[in-house]
Image (tube, rainbow, N blue to C red):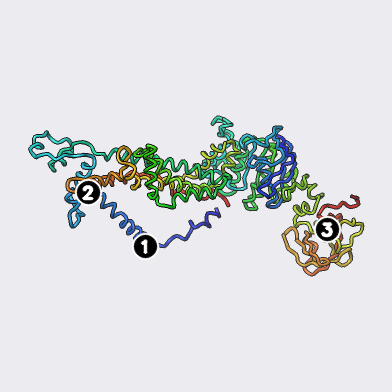
Amino acid sequence: MNARSSTAHSVVEPSLTSRRVASVLVIVYAFVTLIPLFWIFATGFKTPPDSISYPPKVIFEPSLEGYCNLFTTRTRQTSEYIAQLGPPEGICDEVTRRREMVIAGTSNYAPRFINSVIIAFGSTFLSVFLGVMAAYGFSRFKVPLKDDLLFFILSTRMMPPIAVAIPIYLMYRELGLSDTKLGMILLYTAVNVSLAVWLLKGFIDEIPREYEEAAMIDGYTRLQAFRKVVLPQATTGIAATAIFCLIFAWNEYAFAVLLTSGDAQTAPPFIPTIIGEGGMDWPAVGAGTTLFLIPIFIFTILLRKHLLRGITFGAVRK
Amino acid sequence: MAEVVLSHISKKFGSVTAISDVSLTIGNGEFIVLLGPTGAGKTTLLRLVAGLETADAGTISIGGFDATKSAPSSRDVAFVFQQYSLYPHLTVFENLAFPLRSPIRNMSEKDITAKVKEIAGLLRIEDKLQNRATQLSGGQMQRVAIGRALVRSPSIYLMDEPLSSLDAKLRGDLRVELKRIQHVMGATVLYVTHDQMEAMTLATRIGVMKEGHLVQVGTPREIYTDPVDLYVASRLGTPSINSLPSKDFQVAGIPDTVHTIGLRTEHLQIRKGKKGSFIGTVNYVEHLGDQDYLHISINGHELVTLSNPDDGLSTGDEVSLEFVNALYFDRAGNRVHRGKHP
């Protein structure tokens, strides 16, 4: 098709040298960005002494102590007491006893992690849902004061969200939303929805309205046309928006520290509170951070296919 | 199929009048072509019939029912767009089945498959059914788009320049095909184009539009031979009609009100030599193969007309011209009939 060959996608095949240079650059860049991640990952498998040794150890004997400490609380006991206990149950028991401690119970990491999942995915879903609806409305209908409304929506992003932390803290206390998952979902949605509306409006504007008109003439209502024709073509935009919203909600720290302390606390404020004997328990922090990265890692990889598919490319003859 | 009646339709977009008091009856099985330049209101009229726009005034009845305020889905019309015609996320089969799968039709999947196969056969795209819509060539895409309208048996087919994005060869082929299909199915069609060739060959009647008004409706022959004004006359004919100011040409028996003389090829008799009513000079000749375009300058004006290559006329030749049954227009461009008194 002519339209396709005239786009930027059909540039001349790059030469071997330039491809090699590009590969080297990409590898170097990837290496630089991956060092901190690798260090966190490695720390999770170190013993506490190894984790703070100087010079830092790159080669070390891996241990599961970090992961064990992450999920348990422990108490110190005398060696006589430990000696009279039965054989250790599982690897964590064994590792803990070697430090002259016994496992006293489970830590709060798992519930905090689940809170993070519920709050981040809940607010992402809500942001994208509201964003798609609002973006479609702004894109297709005559909305009174459209430009002002869009500016207003954007303007909620013009200050750092933390600037309104105190008012929100007071409001949430009054409304009984402090330290609730619902409160955190609503808060993250409020922050993300402006981004979602603007991003998605751009994507939906790009979808010619002839498609919906055709569907409506073909016997569908506007809502059905939206679901069957607009949404499938907006997947790229929805995926991109969802990733941005999720990353924000997943990593958000300041509001989480301020507004949650127990029931609704997410993982980011919890991880730094993991304190072992004599300071930070770095292996447990490394382990907690590594596990915390996994969901967003999977989510991004799953949606990356959608991001790259470029579903509407070449569909339109101009 | 059904009769569609538009009566006194008007539509404004803000302060711009798109359609102004248009009345038109599209008979059952008729193929009506709306002809006019960009911005004449053709597409708006089509969208009004489809229900994609609502009229400010006037009524639209489809098959005897008042559809003026109905939603597009309940009007039982089919629309072929100029472009953006196929759903890019669906296969050809799914595109064709899309109208049939609509909840209001409630058709069984078996009937849908049968119908899609039948239409695919009619359009000669059976082997493309499993392709993604985006993998088709332009001609195939437009065929499928027409097919998506044909799978249903709506009251009326609305087509908005369905062939204009295609190259000339394909356009010609599909034009013939469209006429054949319309004949086979006995379909009622309202078709928008700015291509006079499509209008002449497809239409049972042509409606010429200008600035939101329907200026003249008639058979292609009527529109061509008996235009109501200079605007309509200039829409049809290749090369387009020559308009000469009557003050520079003394023609016997011409009414006083005539301001412009309209001349098509058939209104001119051209001979080599200097014996005739008017004497002109051949400026140059464009050879088209079977015919020549003759550019003649006469009394300070230029005429373009067709001629037979065997006439042997060449640049610089002096020719004599006779006007035969020329069309006359008054100062406002309205037609003045010979010998008739107002």
Q: Provide the secondary structure element on which disc 3 rests.
A: strand
Per the image, label 2 sits on a secondary structure element best described as helix
Which residue position is annotated with label 2? Answer: A282
Label 3 is placed on what type of residue? Answer: Thr
The N terminus of chain B is located in which quarter?
Answer: top right
Query: Regarding mark 1 in the picture, which secondary structure is present there?
Result: helix
Q: Which mark is residue A181?
A: none
Q: CA distance from mark 3 to mark 2?
A: 96 Å
The answer to whether mark 1 and mark 2 are in CB contact below 8 A is no
Name the kind of residue labelled 2 in the image.
Trp
Picture coordinates of residue A273, whole percent (x, y)? 25, 45
Q: Chain of mark 2?
A: A
Chain for disc number 3: B
Residue B87 in percent (x, y) is at 54, 43
Q: Label 2: how many residues lie within 10 Å, few (<14), some (14-19) or many (20+)?
A: many
Q: CA distance from mark 1 to mark 2?
A: 38 Å
Q: Return the chain for callout 1.
A: A
A219 with respect to B20 (left or right) = left
Res A21 label = 1
